[in-house]
Amino acid sequence: MNLRAIKPPHETRTRILDAAEELFMQHGFESTSMRLLTAKADANLAAVNYHFGSKDALIEAVFRRRLDPMNAGRIAELDRQEKDAGGRALAPEAIIRAFVGASLRMIEDSKNGGRNFIRLLGRTYTDPQKHIRSLIGQLYAPAMERFKSAFERALPQMPRDELVWRIHFMFGTLAYTLAATDTVQLIAGCKPEDRYDARLLEARLTAFLQAGLLAPLHDAGDVKKAA
């Protein structure tokens, strides 16, 4: 027996996850067949079933591999900043940066699949499959609740329902930025390298999101009358 030809289980699992991540990003979840996946991963169906059990479990593993450490990093950064602030409420800009920075940095990671995953994540926000959107919501829930609390402390004067909507818009803007970095060329013809410069994106996005978050409040009754 050629022992060198036997691949370690963790290596096979990683290859399957890498292949699934890329194929789901390119073709979507429904259109990625198991035959296509096993060919890309250089693995057989038995190996996929052994490591994941089902396609749904594989999809969950693809997201957990990236989102769990990403959200843990976001919360850790927020914890660090709050500790440094000595109990004072953070500035909204600092909270925004703590949230968007982790995902924007993945845009720069073209070698280890980070960029593929970010594009996949952006695609998922518009995917019609309810169970996948539900999964993403579950994975994000602890981080979103943690950041919502930080914004409530930073903006005590803002009505809670208004703050929830503004956080929703903030999250949607980030999602579109991650999913459609190519689109900016259609609008402005920017330099290609700027689309994947995390520091530039973070500065631009933070300024934009902060302006929206702190925009003047409008009376809901007046808005309804105007409509």
Image: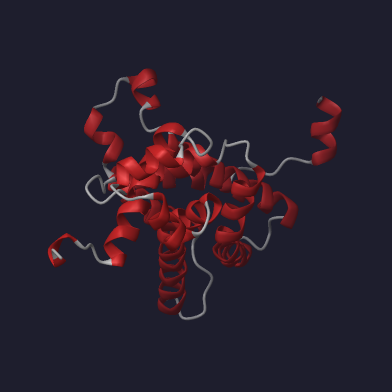
Above or below, 48 against 218 in this view is below
State left or right for residue 159 relative to residue 27. Answer: right
Q: Looking at the picture, how far across and down is residue 104, in whole percent? A: 36, 49
Residue ID at (31%, 47%): 41
Residue ID at (31%, 66%): 9
Q: Looking at the picture, how far across and down is residue 210, in whole percent? A: 50, 48
Q: Looking at the picture, how far across and down is residue 206, in whole percent? A: 43, 47
State left or right for residue 7 relative to residue 60. Answer: left
State left or right for residue 154 relative to residue 110. Answer: right
Give the color scheme: rainbow, by chain, secondary structure or one colour: secondary structure
Residue ID at (16%, 60%): 5
If the image is split into quadrants, where does the C terminus sit?
top right
From this viewpoint, is residue 208 visible? no
If the image is split into quadrants, where does the N terminus sit?
bottom left
Q: Looking at the picture, how far across and down is residue 79, in whole percent? A: 46, 74
In which quadrant of the rendered view does residue 207 lie? top left
Name the one closer to the observer, 84 or 41: 41
Above or below, 175 against 138 in this view is above
The number of callouts visible is: 0
Residue ID at (38%, 57%): 47
Name the one closer to the observer, 219 or 109: 109
Name the one closer to the observer, 145 or 132: 132
Name the one closer to the observer, 31 or 198: 31
From this viewpoint, is residue 26 visible? yes
